[in-house]
Image (spheres, helix red, strand yellow):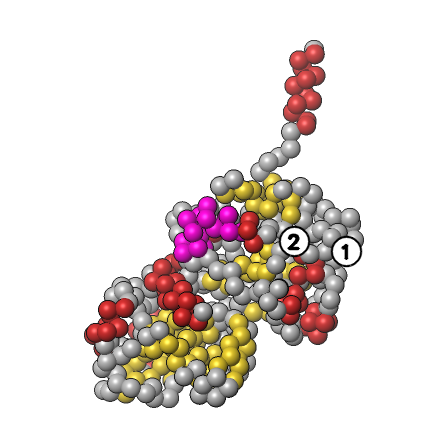
Amino acid sequence: MRIIIFSLLLAAKVCAGQSAVPGAVTSYLETYLREWRMCRHEDYDKSFWSFYNTNTLPFFTAVDINDDNKIDYCVLVRKKNELRLVILLSDGKGFRHWLSDKFPGSATQLQYCLLPEPPGRMDVAYPVISSLILTNNALNVMQMENRACIYYWDGTAISVFLTM
Amino acid sequence: MRYTLLLLIVLFSCTDTHTVTDIDGNVYPVVKVGRQVWMAENLKVTRYRNGDAIPHITSGPEWSQARDGALCSYNNDTGYIEDYGMLYNWYAVNDNRNIAPKGWHIPTAAEVAVLVNALKGDTLAGGSMKTTVPGYWLYPGTVTDTASGFSALPGGYRYGLDGTFHTLGSNAYWWHTTGSYELFAWSSRFYSYFANISRDPQYMTYGFAVRCIKD
C-alpha cells in the first residue's frame, strides 16, 4: 500500500511539471548559503534515472510546510561530498532558511528525492515503533521508493520523523 | 390571446438551470460534467432543508466534541465564506434533515468516481477541477488549460481532534457520503483516501467543504 502511495506521490510530482527552480530560490542560495551548491541531475546515481523521468527535479520541491499560506521551498544542497537539506521559509516578501544535519551517503551518487506529504497519520516500526500525525503539509525525503524521513512543522520549528 | 397566455405560463414555469438556490437564499452556479450536474461553488448554507439551524461552532474543544451537525468558516473568519464556503462536520452532511438544496444531494463515492472518469481519470482530473482564477492555489502550475468549470479552491480543513484549521491555499477537501475527496496544490492528480468514515469514525469530527450534485 505504501509503495502505491509513494508511486502516486512521485507521479504527482511528474505531473506537476516542476521543471525549474524559481529565480528567488537560486538567488537566495547564492547570497546566503554561498559555500553550498544546489544538487544537479549529474549528482544522481545512474540507477535513479533508470527509474525516474529526467524532466523532474528530485532535489527540489515546493510546499507550505509551516502552514502560513506562503509557499516554502525545499532544496538538497551539497558541499563537496556533504549533503544537506535546506528549507526556505517564506514570509511573502523574502526567506529565512533552515539547514538540516548531514545526510548519510554520498553526495555524488544521490538517490534522494523530495516530495510533499499531505496531512495524515503514519505509523512506523523501524527504527523505533512510533507514530506521527501530520495536520499540515510536510516534506518526504525518499530514497528511491523508500521513505527515509519526513520533515514537518511542529508548531514552532522544523522537526524530523525517521521512517527507516 | 390563448397563445400569449400559454407563452407566459411556459416562461414563468421555467427555472434557471444555471444556478441553484439554498434555503438561506445563497445562489450557486452549476456546472455540467459529463452527465452530472454539480454545484460550481462550495456550500454556504446555515440551515437544514426544514429550516433548523446548523450550529455554528467556533471553539476548538467544542468542535472536537460535537456529535451532532456543526459548521464553521476557516479560521472562524467570516471573510473566507464568500470564496470558500463553510466547513461542515460529517454529522451535518449525513443528517436526515438534509443540508443540500431540494433536488440536490451529497455525492456518493461512486458519483465522485463518475466525475473523475469524465475528467480523464484520477491522474489528470485534479488539474481540470481547479479554478483558473489566479491567486488561490499556491502553485498554479498544476491547473490545466482544460478547466471543467468545477472551480475548486484550496479551502483547507478543520482538524477533528482539536478544532484547528489547516492547509488553506494548498489543499481542498470535500465530503462525499462516506469520506473525503481532495486536491493538492502541487499535483494535478485527484485523491480520495484521507478520511474514510468506515475505516475510522474519528474523521466524522473533521470539517470539510461540501459540493452538492443534482438528483
Tag 1 residue: B53
Question: The residue marked by circle 1 belongs to what chain?
Answer: B
Q: Nearer the viewer, residue B77 or A149?
A: A149
- Quarter that holds the C terminus of chain A: bottom left
Q: Amino acid at mark 1?
A: Ala
Q: Nearer the viewer, residue B5 or A41?
A: A41
Q: Is residue B114 left or right of residue A143?
A: right
Residue A110 position within the rendered picture, expressed as x and y whole percent measured from the top left:
27, 79
In the rendered image, the residue lying farthest to the top is B1
Residue A138 marker: none
x 45%, y 62%: residue: B185
Q: Amino acid at mark 2?
A: Lys
Residue B115 position within the rendered picture, expressed as x and y whole percent measured from the top left:
50, 48
x 65%, y 75%: residue: B162
x 68%, y 27%: residue: B12
Q: Nearer the viewer, residue A30 or A8?
A: A8
Sequence-first tag of 2 and 1:
2
**Is residue B118 located in the magenta-colored stretch of the structure?**
yes
Question: The residue marked by circle 2 belongs to what chain?
Answer: B
Q: Is residue A118 left or right of residue B157?
A: left
Range of magenta residues: B112-128
**Is residue B138 located in the magenta-colored stretch of the structure?**
no
Q: Residue B10's quadrant in the figure?
A: top right
